[in-house]
Image (cartoon, rainbow, N blue to C red):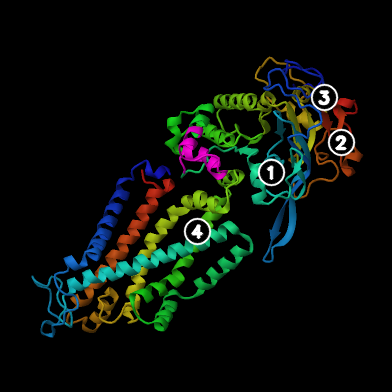
Amino acid sequence: MKGFATPPGREARRALMLAALLTAGFLLPAVFADLLAPFDPSAVDLSGGLQPPDASHLLGRDQQGADILSRLIHGAQISLFVGFWTVTVSTLLGVAVGLLAGYAGGWVEQLLMRLVDVLLAFPGLLLAIALVAMLGAGKTNVVIALSALGWTGFARLVRGQVLAVKNLDYVQAAEGLGANHLRIMGRHILPNIMAPVLVQSSFAIAGAILSEASLSFLGLGVAVGEPSWGAMLSEGRYVLFEAPFVSIFPGTAIMLVVLGFNLLGDAVADWLDPKRRVS
Amino acid sequence: MTDRTAPSRTAPGSSAPGSSAPGSSAPGSSAPSAGAPPPLLEVTGLKKYFPIRKGVFSRLAGQVHAVDGVDLTIAKGETLGLVGESGCGKSTTGKVLLKLIEPTAGTIRVNGEDITHLSKTAMRPYRRQMQIIFQDPYSSLNPRMSAGSIVGEPLTIHKIAKGREKQQRVAALFERVGLRPDQMTKYPHEFSGGQRQRIGIARALALNPSLIVGDEPVSALDVSIQAQVINLLIDLQEEFGISYLFIAHDLAVVEHISHRVAVMYLGRIVEVTGRSALFTNPWHPYTEALLSAVPIPDPSAKRGKRVILKGDVPSPINPPSGCHFHTRCLYVQEQCKVETPQLRELSPGHQVACHFPLGSGTG
């Protein structure tokens, strides 16, 4: 891939810097939440309810008197969990289905891709709501609910890429050497279609984080009391006028993280695709 | 070479038509002996029709007659050139006889054994004997594999060598095709077109094949590089006794490398003969036209009769009746429109599929 050889231009570098900053600003607190959070995120102290930001509580305290900064930091952990696992499950499933459909062709492809079509016809969030309602709230169930549809986009993408690659000469060369299907798929097709999948994964993390926030906002996400950003936003909505900081900070956090992963996806795409390279 | 009666350019050993012996400048010594052992490759009645499907229910709307009844044989150590214009089915023929594309009809025999209907697994031992070099040195190498692992892959697939031994064999192959073993760790994009084609050749050589199909292996290269690669192929043939099916549209290249040449038009072979006979004494009107289109790099050279074909190649979806060439032939007769001419041997080693071949004076 030639894109690796030349460094991206200034514009692209700036976008990449911003993306790196935003995602690092999300990942670090998420990973080291226990070390970084100044307070217990679930501490209840009603006397300090809705206390505005000050020196000790930088982002203020919510209705229960819990420190909003600490809740945000722990909430990043939930967002990361849901984002990471949803995208991992979706990517693995989608790549497997797409690879099989694109490579096998014929009725296998028809069957799998029509299934994808049917699933894509469902309104995504609605299905996720239904699934969480059935399975019950909780991080893992949110991942299951979001992955149930999340893989379809990957399957479509991968199938298209496989169709483009599988008739290239080097795949035919491998066939001519007597390579078996597994080898052709694993060594020759898969490594050459991963670039767009990587980009898509980055966008999908943003999507999953947003969906988790939406579900939690509706009360169908993580378990009650867990500091999900969506849930915090939802709680803040009752006191939007007296204490806007309760909802503003989680809202901003969601926005920045989603922006960060979207920029990261763009940057990765620029980086991997020589045709889109800014010189 | 434009005048079929007066040999002009192919001076060396303008042998009589039919002598299928290699010309003096051609490689190898092994003239195909018409002896007892079966030829290395024997293809009869090979057909490949690609279906055209239309509409919601994939209704069969027609068929592309890419290869429409091809017969050919290649002896051990021999190079058969296969020429014809774009879209005449040359490449498809090459890929079908390697079973990279399943044939619609016909038989393919390797050393007398029928491989036409073998499954992918059953084909594997034959894969060792038959390899391919592709036209495009860019798309024929996996960009995510190092040059060394590309060349070593056949050894892994057939469990011939691994580890250090594999490395040594790959290094030897690199040296044999004119690359340095220290280039094994590089990736395809770090090589030039000619070097990439050498990697492709090394990959094809790794299994010691007895037949290599060259699908226009030099037409994507610069002329100076073309000569190097062709000479490499000729050297390899002399060293290992490899047979080539050399597909090309550049007649000068074909003339240089081939022992015999087959001319293809719209999915059928119209003429097969020894190299020099073809270039000096073509019998099929299409061959004549093809040869007259070759530029002579000498302004003072006497040009013979220039044969310019009218119109385009007809569609292979609905090829003309009778002789496929009758719509453009200068010498067309009524018989040509209804009756398909069979490939017949008019003099030893010189076959033509024409009702009124030029050499017989009816042209």
Q: Determine the chain carrying the residue at label 3.
A: B
For label 1, the residue is B92
Provide the secondary structure element on which disc 1 rests: helix
Does any portion of residue A264 appear in the rendered image? yes
**CA–CA distance between discs 2 and 4?**
53 Å
**CA–CA distance between discs 3 and 2?**
25 Å
For label 2, the residue is B332
- Residue at the far left: name it: A55
**CA–CA distance between discs 3 and 4?**
54 Å
Provide the secondary structure element on which disc 4 rests: helix
Locate residue A185 relative to residue A207 in the image: left or right.
Answer: right
A254 lies above or below A190: below
**CA–CA distance between discs 1 and 4?**
28 Å
| Residue drawn at x 24%, y 72% as measured from the top left | A250
User: Do marks 1 and 2 both belong to one polypeptide chain?
Assistant: yes
Sequence order check, earlier mark of 1 and 2: 1
Identify the mark at residue A201; answer none if there is no mark: none
Q: Nearer the viewer, residue A211 or A89?
A: A89
- Can you say which quadrant of the picture contains the C terminus of chain A? top left
Residue span colored magenta: B145-169
**CA–CA distance between discs 1 and 3?**
27 Å
| Residue drawn at x 78%, y 23% as measured from the top left | B277
Residue B153 lies in magenta, yes or no? yes
For label 4, the residue is A158
What amino acid is labelled 4 in the image? Val
Q: In which quarter of the image is residue A244?
A: bottom left
Where residue A174 sits: x, y (%)?
A: 57, 45
